[in-house]
Amino acid sequence: MIFIGSHSLAHNALVQNGAVFSDRPAPPPTGRILNRNQKAISSSAYGPTWRLLRRNLTYEILHPSRIRAYSSSRRWVLSILTHRLLDTAQSESSVRLIDHFQYAMFCLLVLMCFGDKLQEKQIKEIEAVQRRLLLGFRRFNVLNFWPRLGKILFRKRWKELIQLRQNQDEIFIPLIRARIQAKQTRNVNKDNVMREKEDERVAYVDTLADLQLPEDNRKLEEEEMVSLCSEFLSAGTDTTSTALQWIMANLVKYPRAQDKLYQEIISVVGQPAQMDTDSEERVEQVVEEDDLQKMPYLKAVVLEALRRHPPGHFVLPHKVTQDVELDGYMIPKNTVVNFMVADMGWDPKVWEDPMEFKPERFLTMTGSGEAFDITGSREIKMMPFGAGRRICPGFALAMLHLEYFVANLIWYFDWKPLEGDEIDLSEKQEFTTVMKNPLRARISPRM
Ligand code: HEM
């Protein structure tokens, strides 16, 4: 495996030679899409099929028009999040934020995945099984090195992994069936206009149910859909809740940044009014998604946190499709390449005081008033979402989620560190790079 840490080499590889660097190595045994006999679909299916699945995912559900269709869902989740924070803040002196952020992201992504607002119990069940898989990532990874021997040496671990997959099947398959069934019923009976509006939204499962595997000329099996739903949830929940925690930690640690952000928000939407804690839709007022466009400092705060604390210190592995020369280095076909995301964001040759949290740098950087190009298509300065053809297909959704939740959380609440507590920004490697000491804060409504 080759690691690339230089900005210009990364640009050369991912943007200028994007086609050559856009393949993925076949996933290891523990990362495969399995069918009902716990067998992986044929390895040849990983090439073109993977690309098809990803295109499908990108265009169908992560297309900007689809993202907009979920705006009422974000409002619903914001209501859940703020009231959970409020309830906890009233009963405890400090709040451990990450649990609430994770739950909020699961509410949102589960809805986008299965197309239905589920009960708290069901969402928690999904969250629990997904987190067991994610946190077991390293332990299960051992099984990939000598799969045959590993099956004997680590019998218990294999059993545990298979049991987790079966738990997933038991939870996900009824939801997948219900969605497919509901869609079929709707197609037959299209008389309720209101329901139709809500149901026009495409859920991830809809795109999977429609998919025809090109090589085998067949539809996906239910268990294969489970694997893909699991990937969708893992890709979109842990990354975003980790980033949200890092952003809020910096805003608690640096009150001047928090205050500046609050001033920007109220200059656009005014002060928050009294929250009605008894109403059905408990959050009455929100910073709307359209308002976010008028908040450059908010965007700068989010970008600065992604630069300083990217949730992934590397991207997913890329594989080159042919021999290629890169700035005088020869990279042979099939070489696996990765990119040093965190180091690029901390490079003192590119970033002044790189370890400082200074959102202002993003306000002055482009000079021309253009927004900072997070996709790196012109030039790579940082790449928390990757760059080029294999860039994270959820990057626009992730940026929207981060801006929307940060703006509203700062608008509703004043955030302070615990008495005598220093916010500790040390890192720990889990599935993503998380806070070693999860953020705790005192939060109080602004009114
Ligand atoms: C702050 C939040 C997020 C960060 C930092 C992030 C980062 C990344 C990175 C670095 C990659 C690998 C890119 C590469 O290999 O070159 C990736 C891939 C991916 N991301 Fe995200 N992501 C985030 C949120 C999301 C969301 C919300 C979704 C949608 C549900 C999503 C879906 C995916 C998928 C499906 C892939 C795999 C694409 C492929 O195989 O080519 N991500 N993400």
Image (cartoon, helix red, strand yellow):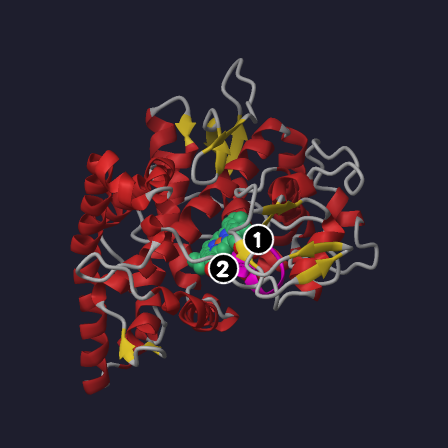
Q: Nearer the viewer, residue 274 or 12?
A: 12
Q: Give the SS element for disc 1.
A: loop
Identify which residue is drawn at 18% across, 51% down.
Answer: 166
Q: Nearer the viewer, residue 5 or 300?
A: 5
The disc at residue 24 is 2
The answer to whether residue 5 is left or right of residue 86 is right
Which is more N-terminal, label 2 or label 1?
A: 2
Asked if residue 419 is positioned above or below residue 200 in the image, the reply reads above
- The image quadrant that residue 22 belongs to is bottom right
Asked if residue 276 is positioned above or below residue 186 in the image, the reply reads above
Bounds of the magenta segment: 385-401
Residue 368 placed where, x, y %?
83, 59
Q: Is residue 170 magenta?
A: no
Identify which residue is drawn at 48% across, 34% down.
Answer: 434
Asked if residue 226 is positioned above or below residue 187 in the image, the reply reads above
Label 2 lies in ligand 1 vicinity (Cβ under 8 Å): yes
